[in-house]
Image (tube, rainbow, N blue to C red):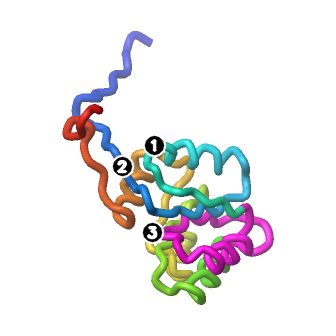
Amino acid sequence: MNDLMFTDFTSQTPPKVYSWKGKTILIAEDTDCSFLYLKTILRNTEATVLWASSGQEAINLVREHREVDVVLMDINMPGVNGFDATIGIHSIRPNLPVIAQTAYVHDNEVQLCYASGCSDYISKPIDKHVLLEKLGVVLGPGVPKALTRIS
């Protein structure tokens, strides 16, 4: 009990600022609290956020909103699951990046994510820095805070 745990935060990379004004992110997530968590992570990016609470709604929103730049797709949703929704989305927009978000990161499920057309995946619970980095591949990288101007 005398041992103390110590986390060395000095080796972590500095926070980044992401500016995605004019970009649209569709979050396909069936639970309110998970959607609100993701929306909170994205609030300072200036991206427009759309919400689909089902796989079918995600397909419909991609059909209606040509401005969607990337989809964050929950895999485990009622009705049309994330795998089938991704296939449906790619029948409308074959090159639209879809990042799967899943709590079940077994090799089988990761393979199914890629097989259904997802370009990447992120495991739950979602780390905000990992999410922003993955979105940055599609929407534009972040700039270290130290390099941004203070207005």
Instruction: Return the residue at label 1.
Output: 44
Amino acid found under the numbered disc labelled 2 = Tyr
Q: Is residue 40 above or below residue 113?
A: above
Q: Indicate the position of residue 5 as horizontal and vertical percent values.
A: 37, 21
Q: Can see residue 13?
A: no
Span colored in magenta: 53-81
| Callout 3 secondary element | strand
Q: Can see residue 146?
A: yes
| Callout 1 secondary element | helix
Instruction: Return the residue at label 3.
Output: 120
Pick the quarter of the image with the C terminus: top left
Q: CA distance from mark 3 to mark 1?
A: 23 Å
Q: Indicate the position of residue 114 as horizontal and vertical percent values.
A: 49, 77
Which-is-in-front pick, marks 3 and 1? 1
What residue do we see at 27% from left, 38% from top?
A: 145
Q: Residues within 10 Å of mark 2 (few under 14, many from 20)?
A: many
What residue do we see at 64% from left, 45% from top?
A: 36
Amino acid found under the numbered disc labelled 3 = Asp
What residue do we see at 38% from left, 63% from top?
A: 139
Q: Residue furthest front?
A: 151
Q: Residues within 10 Å of mark 1 (few under 14, many from 20)?
A: few
The part of the image, by quadrant, that contains residue 21 is: bottom left
Residues at circles 3 and 2 in contact by the CB criterion of under 8 Å? no
Q: Indicate the position of residue 91 as horizontal and vertical percent values.
A: 59, 89
Residues at circles 1 and 2 in contact by the CB criterion of under 8 Å? yes
Amino acid found under the numbered disc labelled 1 = Asn
Q: CA distance from mark 3 to mark 2?
A: 19 Å
Q: Indicate the position of residue 102 as horizontal and vertical percent values.
A: 59, 60
Q: Earlier in the sequence, mark 3 or mark 2?
A: 2
Horizontally, residue 64 falls left or right of residue 132, namely right
Question: Which numbered marker is on residue 60?
Answer: none
Instruction: Return the residue at label 2.
Output: 18
